[in-house]
Amino acid sequence: MQAFVAPTALPLRGKAAAAAFSARPSDVFASRRATPRMVVLGKPPTPSNVPAPGPDGDSSSSKPSTPALVSTLPQWKALQKHKESIIDQTHLRELLDDDERVLQLAAEYDGVFMDYSRQRISLETKKLLLELAEAVNLKQRIKDMVSGKRINTTENRAVLHTALRAKKSEVVMLDGVNVVEQVHTVLDRIRTFTETVRSGKHVGASGKHIKNFVAVGIGGSYLGPDFLYEALKTDPAASSAGQQAGYSLHFLANVDPVDVKRALDGFDPEETMVIVVSKTFTTRETIVNAKTVRTWLWDAMGTDPKVVRQHMVACSTNLAKTKDFGISPENVFPFWDWVGGRYSVCSSVGALPLSLMYGFNTFDKFLNGARSIDKHLVNAPLDRNIPVLMGLMGVWNMSFMGYKSRAMHPYTEALNKLPAHIQQVDMESNGKHVSRHGVDLDFEVGEVDFGEPGTLGQHSFFQLLHMGQVVPCTFIGFIESQNPTCQDGEPVSNHDELMSNFFAQPDALARGKTSEECRAEGRSEDLIPHITFTGNRPSLSLLLPVLNAYTCGQLLSLFEHRTAVQGFVWDINSFDQWGVELGKVLATKVRKQLNQARYHGKPVADFNASTKRMVERYLFGSVGCAFDEIIDYE
């Protein structure tokens, strides 16, 4: 089959595209007739000369041997047996009727109350899970993380997002340096800079006061700060320092030009500051968007270097590239390779845009809340440790009960972006297929996380949660609303109406509704199968005082540590993300092909038939491309 060559070096559009497309060989999309081949897809080969881990994960023998998986431990096998012999035979109705069990399956710390009595566990299950945690030396693994040991072994990095919210007086040493001092040096710079901007001392190139902010970043550089921004928009204290003071913050993440338009819509370039967030300052989507916004600034104010100096700042460690871009070195705020992107919201990544928007004091309260749970994680006994218990419930539901999805339901619209952030934290961390020693797992890890605020989710996917596959749920509620209101003639306040659903849904999922209960209501026999709820669907509930900067920090830390605990128990590396790399490499190849085809008339080549067909269709449109030309019916 002859490759199609674009007849022009310019991008093809409209009639030119149609003419070029009609000129291609008639079999451009035809499948090659070839002898079918069997392709066996498998996992990478297992290393054979890695020493088996001892109780703390270190080598227990000098002899080369296959590393032991956690599933070989007697505590793991005891849980499997317990699940099959006891839990599989027990309904949550029965478990919830045990008052003593219900009392013991709860934990509380610093205003956070967790009820996990609607999990499909007995007190014996909890005991066995804690024994598993002891067997994998969970407490030591946690201490290794917060003390700066290089637990991200594939990248030889420490994992120190907890140091980002440590008090200035604390000491965490890494390579002979107290990283807490480094953190507070950057935080002090951010405090000074953001106060300078908000006070009007730092103005735009034309002398106007800056009141609009655009944060350009993707993935962990966007999802965490966006969650916190949305959560605090309706917090009275944060709002008075933000929107009510005339400030606005938009996020630009997607390289789709539509996102650019939406992020800049309504903003005056002369009153706008752009925060570019990229550790290496090489992330393709972020740099393309940063250049696009820079052009927007130049179009409005000219290309004098002071335009970029006054209107663009960065969170990055690559001072050479930020300088080449035109950003002043004093306007670059670093973070470190021991901060993973999805764990970076407490670094300059979140501190800079959110302090510009809400003031540094608001962000400081957020750090205090996260620190509260960090201390609880390290110091609380395992049986009363909220993030540890959350993580153990995750291990139980995924690896023993076989529930492969998990849903989050925050009963406040202000947390509408929290599920997306935790989705990245959890799935990018624990979406693995080998242990930290590179051994293929013989059990499944890593849930599919999703969620919506209540009660929106109830009118979207709760039908499946109640009557379809079993999906463990996490409910998040608050005693007080950020915006309390009530209506004349209504029996309860708006917040009470919302929270009525928060309390009802976990019981509906757990207890269900039997056919006998349906008959007692006088329902017809034909309808009963359709309105019977099997129940026995697990959930966990978190109740906090009110959503503010402090409790946002608590929630972030709880879910970050839940993810880490699950990874520690599974003995996987939760802090690398090699799964995102392959697609980036392939995208680079496609990018080069698009450039060569559009601007240099080169043929589309070096792809498999399916990708080649799609790329050519994208480049040259569907004009003249009949369906029967694509499919060979013979």
Image: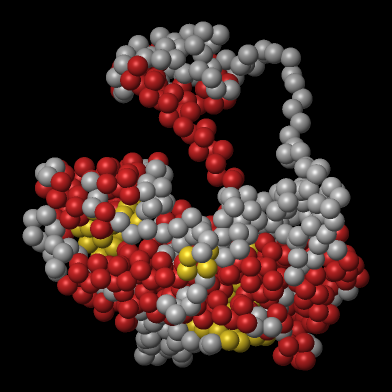
Q: Is 15 rendered above or below residue 239?
A: above
**Residue 606 showing in the rendered view:** yes
> On the image, which quarter does residue 472 sit in?
bottom right
In the rendered view, does 404 fall on the left or right side of 409? right
Q: Is residue 255 left or right of residue 568?
A: left
Residue 352 on image: x %, y %: 33, 64
Colour logic = secondary structure
* Residue 606 image point, x, y percent: 54, 19
Q: Nearer the viewer, residue 450 or 629?
A: 450
Instruction: Judge whether 228 appears above or below 309 on screen.
Output: below
Q: In the picture provided, is 459 more to the left or to the right than 417?
A: right
Residue 479 x, y percent position in the rendering = 49, 87
Residue at point 35%, 11% (across, down): 7
Residue 177: x and y, percent? Answer: 48, 65
Q: Residue at x 46, y 91 (%)?
A: 491
**Which of 96/611 is in front?**
611
Judge from the rendering whether residue 87 lies leftward or rightward of residue 159; answer left or right. Answer: right
Q: Residue at x 61, y 77 (%)?
A: 377
For the question of whether residue 498 can be seen, the reply is: no
> Between residues 49 and 265, which one lies in front from this camera angle?
49
**Number of marks present in the image shown:** 0
> Residue at left 56%, top 60%?
158
